[in-house]
Amino acid sequence: MIDDETVRHVARLARLRLSPDEEKVMREELSGILEHIDAIRAMDLDGVPPTTHVITLENVVRPDVPVPGLPREEALREAAHATDEGFGVPRMD
Amino acid sequence: MGLRDLTATGQIAAIRAGETSSEELVDAHLAAIGADDVDAFLAVDAEGARERAREIDAMPERPPLAGVPIGIKDALSVRDVVTTSGSRMLEGFRPVYTATCVARLEAAGAVVVGKTNMDEFAMGSSTENSAFKNTLNPWDHGRVPGGSSGGSAAAVAERQVPWSLGSDTGGSIRQPAALCGIVGMKPTYGAISRYGLIAFASSLDQVGPLARSVEDAALLLQHMVGRDPMDSTSLEWPGGIVAPTATDLSGMRVGVVEELMGEGIEPGVRAAIDAALGTVEELGGTVVPVSLPSALSGLATYYVLAPAECSANLARFDGIRYGPVAPAANLLDQYETTRGDLFGPEVKRRIMLGTFALASGYYDQYYGRAQRVRTLMGREFARAFEQVDLLASPTSPTVAFPLGDRTADPYAMYMADVCTIPVSLAGLPAISIPCGLADGLPVGLQLAGPAFSENALLGAAHALEGALAFDTRPPGLVT
Amino acid sequence: MSACEPVIGVEIHVQLSTRTKMFCGCELSFGDPPNTHTCPVCLAHPGVLPVVNEEAVRRALLIGLALGCEIAPRSIFHRKNYFYPDLPKAYQISQFDIPICGRGEFRALREDGSELVVGITRAHLEEDAAKLTHAGGRRAGAAESVVDFNRGGTPLVEIVTEPDLRSPSDVALFLRQLRQTLLFLGVSDCSMEEGSMRADANVSIRPVGSHEFGTKTELKNMNSFRFLERGIEAEIARQEEIVAAGGRVSQETVHYEPDTGHITSLRSKEESHDYRYFPEPDLVPIAPDPAWVEDLRTGLPELPLPLRQRMVGEMGLSAEDAEVLTEVPELVAYFMEAAAEADPKACANWIRGELRAQLREAGVEPWQSKVTPAHIAALVGLLDAGTVTVPAAKEVLAEVIASGEEPGAVIESRGLGAMDEGDLAAIVSEIVAANPDQAQQLRDGKDKVIGFFVGQAMKRTSGRADPQSVQRLVREAVRGD
């Protein structure tokens, strides 16, 4: 139902590293799940619009007025690699 | 009867009557947590709780919830208290803000004693997906408490706290409540602010109460509902939540969902539900069969939509701004290793499934279609509620299953939510109340109503609860 | 090989100069220390939710209305998913197939007076990414880049044009005039250098007369209209070369280096993205009240092109006057106030001429100086009435710049008023009498010598003589002898 190439492509899109074993298991499991999910592909949905929101609210906005944010120490507090210059990130090849 | 045997409402009354204090209550519950057999809690803040209890005891005017202790599912942010959402991806993470619903309860006088265990990122139906440990069912320690709010349910059933908060996306409050023999409710989508709830599936997630009585559930709801400027999808709630007092169901039409009473429902569960429906009639209600054909597509629809949304919601976990991070040679390596190592297998499965469902070439067939099935489902519910006031079904097709029973087959685990999912997809309120036993294990009856029907729903549940007189004390529990 | 024509479309990102970010209440700032304007929302902490900035919506509507766009009765937000350190949620909240503004059109005016019409495909709201800076790598084992989230979440309006542009110079013209319109709306600072306005070009070529589109490339990250223009020129040349050699243009992103003039392909570094767009579940639709939209439409300021056309057609200004005076809204307002009370053409001359020249040294704009539009109008009036001469008026202006005094008062206190005709005639007679040789030369037809007499008269009168009157009186005096 879903091949190795697709598994690898999706894992890359999701930035998940899967070991070769994990890839194999993932392919089997996803294929199994997709078999069940496929039921919806057979349904007659002609003319049925999609639901993007179950509630009917519209125009929820806030005024353009500043609200106090985080002091820098708190903004950086939980990060493994952060200094006053910013949040550290390794090089991008 | 000990203090812990009182419901939260009972404990509030006792405090107000001068029979006990918040500090005494908090101590009693902390002691129970300390002697814990069921591993319901991930983190306990004894010092903070005691301090807050003393503060409240010293107030000239007690706030409404009077200093009664509460457990909070670890999916909800509490400022400076380690919040992991059951995942190693957030191991040691201390939020810099508190979820709105928790803040409202704290302002009303609830005392947070700790964070409860859960399936990782709320994905699961047994709490076995927690990265840290299993939680045991107080009714049988060899069985699961349900999930994803398993810790919250077990803590209440075990009387470690009189009530707790959970979150429900496809059944994660109702199903564990049913398996643990307590009350659990998912309100109308938008009733309670999601600000501070670590997101799983944004269009489905809702916070809700777990408690030992409908009255308690209503009380928690009352102090949480209402618009939050920090959540664009939260609703005004004019009139609020009224304390339920009904004792009969005269005039109530209750529709039994045919598609959720067929094969797949355990005979023992079926029998308990039938008996409960008999009680509905004794109370003056009318029970009629109702058909919701799309309910059978609920699972498939849910397992496209929820993973799709979660794949985006969990993309922020990359170790850059918070949480642990894997050592890496470059950025791509850091993303892939951190996420590959720190997410558990179920979470990775759902991220993969969701990413696939949204990927170019697949969107129309999967995500696009699932959204349209959702419309169909909403229409069917609307039509059903023209015929009946409430819908009834089992909450869970089975009683609590043994630990390890379903961990090998993801879809078998997903089946646990077949009764609870349709209501989530439609954004409607539903409550599970314990209605009987099957093989000595609790069975939950689910009642659902139209959007905004919380008061009617709670009233009906309260009346039925009174007549069913289910004993929520697990065998062997010492209080 | 038939002749090729370039086909160019532009995507412009405009940072809105609101006070706060698009989806949270953090204050927008420029140049503050890193990560001092953040909150859990724009840091994408677990559990946070976006809430739309109402002023950003209003400004997006203004932009759409000014561009003649169809305003969507109901638009929604979408998530655009990709991983990058400057995007904390790993998705950008944007708008996909139902944007707030639909089809529209922009008219620009070329120098030769011809009109350039550019179709607008759409304009939509989204949030800006944070700032990723590549660190110097001073310390071994240190992070190679750092992220500052101050800018993350700034409201953006993305404007997309139809591929209607046919030359790099037209692109620059369009962008300059679009920028002017946006400045007039007061929605953004529109600075390419500061990054509050960014433009990317989609460039392709095709045989002249063809109606099909060639493969397009995307030219990004140019930080001035001039560099973008040159980059487009270079890219067109590159594509023409490829096609002339029998090859095919590949769809890719290209980068232009202004220093070297080189175009390089970025294709190897960028994979094509699958953004996996889906509707944003955390936000509800925007359905602006039609009455409100109508109010915004009627309340739009007069936009640069129609304004310039009115200045030329109704107020008698030259096209150049109009172009200069409509550079910025403040200058328009200044001029209009003056022109309401005195001859517009004269006001225009004085404002764009002498006033700006005198203020240039101080580096101050007319509306920042002590000279009010009323002062200009007064000065023009006094000149018109002959109360003061042009040279004297320049001195008066200098005084007003310094002191802010009324021109009339300055004329009085400094004695700069135009000379009485009779007094002037007397002085002229004296000068003519004192210079018989020059007088004779003038009689003999050496007209250039009139300048000598004018010079003398100006000296004698400290500039209070009107040169034209002096000339007339000198000729009369000389004839009279």
Image (cartoon, coloured by chain):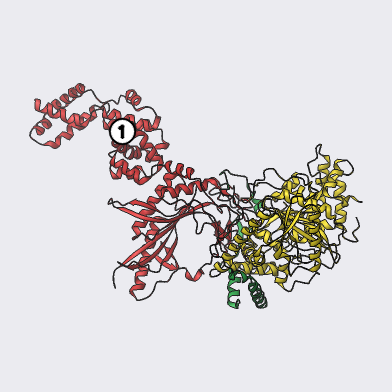
The percent position of residue B108, horizontal first and vertical second, equals 76, 44
SS class of the residue under badge 1?
helix
| Amino acid identity at mark 1 | Lys
Q: Nearer the viewer, residue C249 or C390?
A: C249
Q: Which quadrant holds residue B271?
A: bottom right
Task: Give the answer, above or below, for where B445 lies relative to B247.
Answer: below
Q: Colour of chain B?
A: yellow
* Count of numbered circles in the view: 1
Q: Describe residue B71's horizontal placement relative to residue B374 as left or right.
A: right
Chain identity of mark 1: C
Q: Is residue B45 visible?
A: no
Q: Describe residue C302's horizontal placement relative to residue C73 as left or right.
A: left
Task: Chain letter for red, please.
Answer: C
Task: Chain letter for green, please.
Answer: A
Q: Describe residue B49's horizontal placement relative to residue C226 as left or right.
A: right
Where is mark 1, residue-wise?
C394
The percent position of residue B263, horizontal first and vertical second, equals 74, 70
Q: Nearer the viewer, residue C323 or B280?
A: B280
The percent position of residue B100, horizontal first and vertical second, equals 69, 49
